[in-house]
Image (cartoon, rainbow, N blue to C red):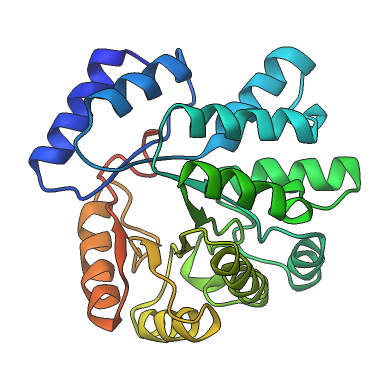
C-alpha cells in the first residue's frame, strides 16, 4: 500500500505500452491509492470494487459474508464516483453455477478472488448474487457515469484440468445474456475469460465466447498454458496471449513473474 510505489508501477506500465491499468489494491489506504492512480494516469483505469467492499465488511461487520447488498453497491458507487473507467463485476456467479460446480467437482475449486468472496456470501446467506439479482441497478449506475462493465469470470479454471468445464461454461452463458441486457441499456460491456487453458483449447474458448456473447470484447487473464510456471508466468502468459490474440481476443491482462508468488 505505499502510494509512491503504486504510482511507480503505473508509470512503468504506461512506459511499457500498457493500454489500460488495473488497481487491484487490497491493503493500505485503498481509496487514496485509487484516487492518486486515477489522477496520475493517462490510460483507462479499472478496479474490482468487491475487493474493497469485502475488506470494509471485515472491518465493520467482522466478515465478508456479513456484507449487505447496500454495502456492496456503496462500494461500487465509490469507485465509480472516483472516476474509474471500468469495473470488474462477477455477475455470472449464480446459485445455479455454484450448484453445478459442486456437482461436477474440480481439481482447483475457485481461484477468482472476487468470485470466492461472492460464493462465500451466497452460500452463507442462502441468497442469489446481488450483482446478478440487482443487475439493473448496476446498469443504471454504469450508464449514468459512462463506466464500462467488465463481466468477471468467478468460475474461471485455476488449472488446465479444469479448463472449459461445466461451471465455466454455465457462467459464460449467463454473461452472454447479461451482455445483451447491458447493450439494451446503453452500457458498454466486455467479458473476462480464463485463466489456465491448455494450448489446444485457447482458440475454442475465444470462439465460444464470441458466439455466446455476440462479439463482445474478450478480456483474458494470460491465458497461462501450464500450471507449473510459477515465477515464469510472464512467459507462459505471453505464449497463451499470442495464441488468444491471434484467435480474436481483444484485451490481454498481462501476467507478471510475481503471479502465484506474491500478490499484485
In the image, residue 130 sits, relative to residue 12, either above or below, namely below
Q: For the N terminus, give its image quadrant.
A: top left
Image quarter of residue 56: top right
The reply, left or right, for residue 129 in relation to residue 25 is right
In this rendering, the count of numbered labels is: 0
The reply, left or right, for residue 124 in relation to residue 208 is right
Q: For the C terminus, give its image quadrant.
A: top left
The reply, left or right, for residue 23 in relation to residue 147 is left
In the image, residue 213 sits, relative to residue 33, either above or below, namely below
The reply, left or right, for residue 4 in relation to residue 35 is left
In the image, residue 13 sits, relative to residue 156, either above or below, namely above
The percent position of residue 51, horizontal first and vertical second, equals 56, 33
> Residue, x 21% and y 50% (percent of image)?
19
> Residue, x 59% and y 32% (percent of image)?
77
Image quarter of residue 103: bottom right
The percent position of residue 260, horizontal first and vertical second, equals 39, 44
> Residue, x 72% and y 28% (percent of image)?
71
Name of the residue lying farthest toward the left: 15
> Residue, x 73% and y 56% (percent of image)?
132
In the image, residue 131 sits, relative to residue 74, either above or below, namely below
Front-most of 213 and 162?
Answer: 213
Front-most of 190 and 27?
Answer: 190
Image quarter of residue 6: top left
The percent position of residue 62, horizontal first and vertical second, equals 77, 17
The percent position of residue 54, horizontal first and vertical second, equals 65, 29
Amino acid at each position: 500500500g505505499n502510494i509512491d510505489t503504486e504510482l511507480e508501477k503505473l508509470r512503468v506500465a504506461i512506459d511499457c505500452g500498457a493500454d489500460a491499468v488495473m488497481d487491484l489494491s487490497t491493503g493500505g489506504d485503498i481509496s487514496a491509492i485509487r484516487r492518486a492512480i486515477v489522477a496520475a494516469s493517462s490510460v483507462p483505469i479499472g478496479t474490482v470494487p468487491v475487493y474493497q467492499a469485502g475488506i470494509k465488511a471485515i472491518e465493520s461487520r467482522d466478515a465478508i459474508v456479513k456484507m449487505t447488498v447496500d454495502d456492496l453497491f456503496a462500494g461500487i458507487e465509490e469507485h465509480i464516483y472516483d472516476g474509474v473507467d471500468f469495473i470488474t463485476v462477477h455477475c455470472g456467479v449464480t446459485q445455479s453455477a455454484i450448484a453445478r460446480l459442486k456437482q461436477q467437482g474440480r481439481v482447483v475449486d475457485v481461484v477468482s478472488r472476487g468470485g470466492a468472496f461472492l460464493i462465500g456470501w451466497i452460500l452463507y446467506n442462502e441468497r442469489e448474487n446481488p450483482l446478478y439479482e440487482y443487475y439493473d441497478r448496476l446498469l443504471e449506475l454504469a450508464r449514468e457515469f459512462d463506466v464500462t462493465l467488465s463481466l468477471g469470470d468467478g468460475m474461471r479454471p485455476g488449472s488446465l484440468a479444469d479448463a472449459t468445464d461445466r461451471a465455466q461454461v454455465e457462467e459464460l452463458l449467463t454473461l452472454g445474456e447479461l451482455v445483451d441486457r447491458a447493450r439494451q441499456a446503453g452500457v458498454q460491456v466486455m467479458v473476462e475469460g480464463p485463466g489456465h487453458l491448455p494450448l489446444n483449447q485457447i482458440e475454442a474458448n475465444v470462439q465460444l465466447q464470441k458466439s455466446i456473447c455476440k462479439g463482445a470484447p474478450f478480456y483474458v487473464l494470460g491465458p497461462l498454458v501450464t500450471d507449473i510456471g510459477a515465477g515464469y508466468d510472464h512467459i507462459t502468459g505471453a505464449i497463451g496471449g499470442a495464441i488468444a490474440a491471434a484467435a480474436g481476443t481483444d484485451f490481454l491482462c498481462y501476467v507478471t513473474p510475481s503471479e502465484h508468488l506474491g500478490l499484485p
